[in-house]
Image (cartoon, helix red, strand yellow):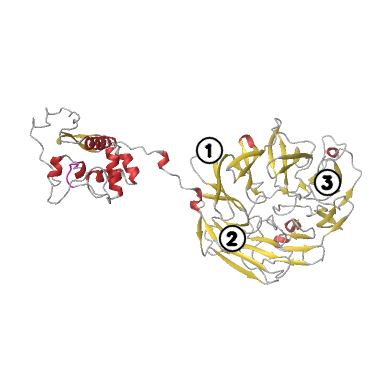
Amino acid sequence: MAEGEQRRELRPTEGADATSRLLEELLAEGRPVAEIAVRLGISVPDAHARIRGAPPGRELEDAGPPLPPSLAPPEQAGSGGKRRAPPAPGGVGGGPPGRRPSAPEPGRGLSRRAFLALAAAGVAGLATGGTFLAMRGGEEEDTVVRPPRPVPVPPTLTPVPPALTALQPATGIFKELTLEPGQPLTEEHGIFFLRTRGEGAGSVTGWQLAEPGGAGPPVYRAGAGRRFIATGGALHERTTGRSWTWPEDRLRLLGLSDYGALFEVMEDGLGPHLTKRARYVLTNGQLEERAEFELTGTVLPSIPPFFAPGGRRVFLALEQPQQYPSLFMLDGATGKASTVFAPQRQRTLQRILLHATTPASDGESFLLPFSYWPTRPPLTLGYGIFATFVARLGWAGDHLGVTRVRVDRAFVSPDGSLAAGERVLAVPGTEPPLFEETSTVLVFDGQTGRNLFRVRSARLNYGDELGGARWLADSSGVVMQTKIGGKVGYSFVSRDGSRLEPLPEPPGPSEEWFRHPDMRGAAPSPDDPSLIAFGRTDLYDRASGGWTSMNPTEAAPAHVGPWAGAGSDEVVLALPHRPHRMFPLLADLDETRIEHNLPSEGDDA
């Protein structure tokens, strides 16, 4: 030992380095090196180096493993850290060549605490495939080498990063555009909002990606409530100007509202014949994680996720094995997922389709239509649907009732008292049955399913993938495609079938994309019975007779709903148009008329 140097004791001294103190205590307790490395937050090789007295990350040049002075036997401590020459054969601690050394005995040149520390280091060396020197009475005897073996790390010590770490704030992603009333919209892509009333009525505000990139134009959408807009792996908050981005191979945005978002965590590893089990993350309005869920199934495109008022719960429809869907309620407050609706399976029916929901006007429930397909084509329905039902569910997931209506797709009035749907009727007395050449709209009682009246030569399944309502916000009537005076257009029909009011044709251009009247489909406002949007570009006010319009000149509208599930202060238009699968019309339109005095059973109509 050098002059003036004092021997260190195992017990920590006042002011000593905390890491060194912890290392000494762990060695004294006989902890394996793998555990020491985890406790110190360093790698296993660095732990070996710390035990030998070398700086972390650097092995000693000498192959031997000298211990720290406080743990070394007196001979090593007194030599100033220099290694003693190996003893001659048969010397102290020696033995016959090739004989495995026995364990040292406490009190023979090595303290009990130092012995325990050295034994722990030796066992850890074996576990990690390292090399250590067996000693007896403070003397080295021979070197024992073991092949490398992986050191198991406890699962709890390997934390999985939160899914939303992939969601990062960003700047400069979106640029904002402003158009004065009547100014042509010359952009080729973006999402735009037409102000419908008040100050600035007729003006347009839009957003688009600053650097789109990719193989094709971006696909834009607005969240329910229109606070957020999104495209691909980017999201923007209109009110604050904040933006977020994420890698699309790690997250997929499923639903978006003013209250938060629902993401699917993208993971690989499932075989082609395995049922998909995925993780979903629900956020709050600040895009911070509320809860994470793990569910089995595939997301249904026919019914996008939707949020309950307040945003604490989100409803997600997933296709289950054998093509039977279920509606799940994900509760962000409790972190629990529960099945709130699963249509009863029918042995003779092929599959079930859930349709988009309608919030009920009572604010306490929503209406969910669903349809059954038969295993063989039916002989009594023109659209191939066996039956459609409308379920009424509370926002807490409670069941409030189910009504059957014999139509292809049911549109329910906001108050739930009426339902309307389209059918191609069979010609009475024909065997096998023949079907009419025109379609008929049937209006039913929302509680009993009884057919109240029908509108001959009219359609509800119109528009270029135009979802949303057909009923006015106050349930006073329904809008449908009609043919009046030989011209196809749109009309309002009162809830009792007593009045047919033709609506005017939009004043915008009628060439190219707008040439077919189907492309200028009418969509009533969700909260103002006087406002009706046409073709996602024009707004008609039934009260004043006035029009407000956007005039895209370079691109046709995409398949975004004009109201985005919110109020009527704005109409939404996304560009450009995206290709989609077109279904042929099964019936034409003749002169429209209303018929009453129907049979008591709606299914016989």
Q: Is residue 217 visible?
A: no
Nearer the observer, disc 1 or disc 3?
3
Query: Callout 3: helix, strand or loop?
Result: strand
Please report the residue visible at 57 percent of the width from the left and 60 percent of the height from the top: 236
The residue positioned farthest toward the right in the image shown = 597
Chain-order first, disc 2 or disc 3: 2
Left or right position of 263 against 355:
left
> Between residues 258 and 349, which one lies in front from this camera angle?
258
C-alpha distance separating marks 2 and 3:
41 Å
Q: Quadrant of the C terminus?
A: top right
Span highlighted in magenta in the image: 61-65
Q: Position of residue 509 (x, y in %)?
A: 73, 66
Q: Position of residue 372 (x, y in %)?
A: 72, 38
Left or right position of 544 against 239:
right
> Between residues 545 and 279, which one lies in front from this camera angle?
279
Residue type pointed to by label 2: Glu
Residue type pointed to by label 1: Pro
Q: Which residue is mark 2?
A: 237
Q: Characterize the local packing of mark 1: few (<14), some (14-19) or many (20 or more) Cα atoms within 10 angstroms.
A: few
Left or right position of 265 against 227:
left
- Using the rendered view, name the quadrant where residue 296 is placed: top right
Chain-order first, disc 1 or disc 3: 1
- Using the rendered view, name the quadrant where residue 156 is placed: top left
The residue positioned farthest toward the front in the image shown = 14
Q: Which mark is residue 443?
A: 3
Chain-order first, disc 1 or disc 2: 2
Q: Which residue is mark 1?
A: 272
Q: Magenta stretch: dominant SS?
A: loop
Nearer the observer, disc 2 or disc 3?
2
